[in-house]
Amino acid sequence: MVIKDVTLETVCGVTSVLPENTHMEFAFAGKSNVGKSSLINGLMNRKALARTSAQPGKTQTINFYNINDALYFVDLPGYGYAKANEEEKAKWGRMIENYLHRSRQLRVVFLLVDIRHEPSGNDRLMYDWILKQGFEPVIIATKLDKIKRSQIPKNIKLIREGLKTVKNTVIIPYSAITKQGREEIYTLLDSYLEQ
Ligand code: GTP
Ligand code: MG
């Protein structure tokens, strides 16, 4: 996959009407601060088109990036942002849920988990939801540069066990710093676009 043109086409807040896109959508879900926006920047080869932050809770809208006028990357707000108040959390939750249920073009939900940590209850809920909706879940284990190479197999095993993954679930370790894992993600995207 060669990404030539990218535009942030639609930004949806809580009260926005979701766009009825005609191209396939690939969404990026995961807990706040896990690296969704950083991964999208890495895939688009842009340093900062998707806004990132060391503070959790950066992305508070659903952002649709038009890629090559052929597909969309959908940057979702993170869940489990502890500092948000209950009302805000519920609002974002409904927004994400609403999008995931309503989109007709959604093909894949990439679920991002931090390679250093065991998945949370919310991660498990999201994984189960993806399966239940009939999507093939793809797990991206982020922040690969933060662990030693020798730790990778053990941590991947913990993620598999924590999410209780089904047999065919792919887990791709990724680093936004070294871009390790990016080619594998491109190959996967290509395989969906060819279908
Ligand atoms: P929300 O929008 O709050 O849900 O967060 P997000 O999932 O979009 O995370 P974001 O991409 O903003 O990244 C959060 C922080 O983690 C930033 O400080 C990033 O620089 C850092 N980060 C993301 N990916 C990586 C990675 O692969 N390696 C390292 N070392 N840092 C990363
Ligand atoms: Mg973000």
Image (spheres, rainbow, N blue to C red):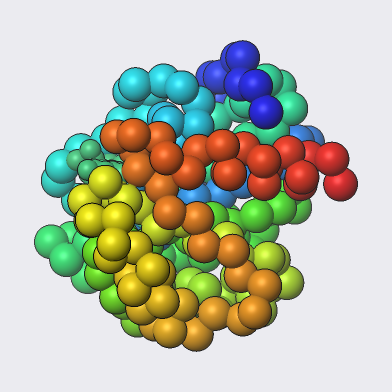
Give the left or right position of residue 53, taking residue 26 as reference.
left
Pick the residue in front: 193 or 105: 193
Task: Determine the image quadrant of residue 150.
Answer: bottom left
Q: Residue 185: image x %, image y %?
A: 58, 44
Tally of numbered discs? 0
Residue shown at the point (54%, 79%) measured from the top left:
165
Residue shown at the point (46%, 77%) measured from the top left:
160
Is there any visible trace of residue 32 in the rendered image? no
Is there any visible trace of residue 146 in the rendered image? yes
Q: If the image is split into quadrants, where does the N terminus sit?
A: top right
Task: Determine the image quadrant of residue 101.
Answer: bottom right
Give the left or right position of residue 15, taking residue 72 as reference.
left
Residue shown at the point (29%, 75%) measured from the top left:
118
Ligand 1 in which quarter: top left
Vertically, is 132 above or below 82?
below
Pick the residue in front: 161 or 137: 161
Pick the residue in front: 7 or 3: 3
Give the left or right position of residue 95, taking residue 166 as reference.
left
Q: Residue 69: image x %, image y %?
A: 71, 22
Vertically, is 56 above or below 111?
above
Q: Residue furthest top?
A: 4
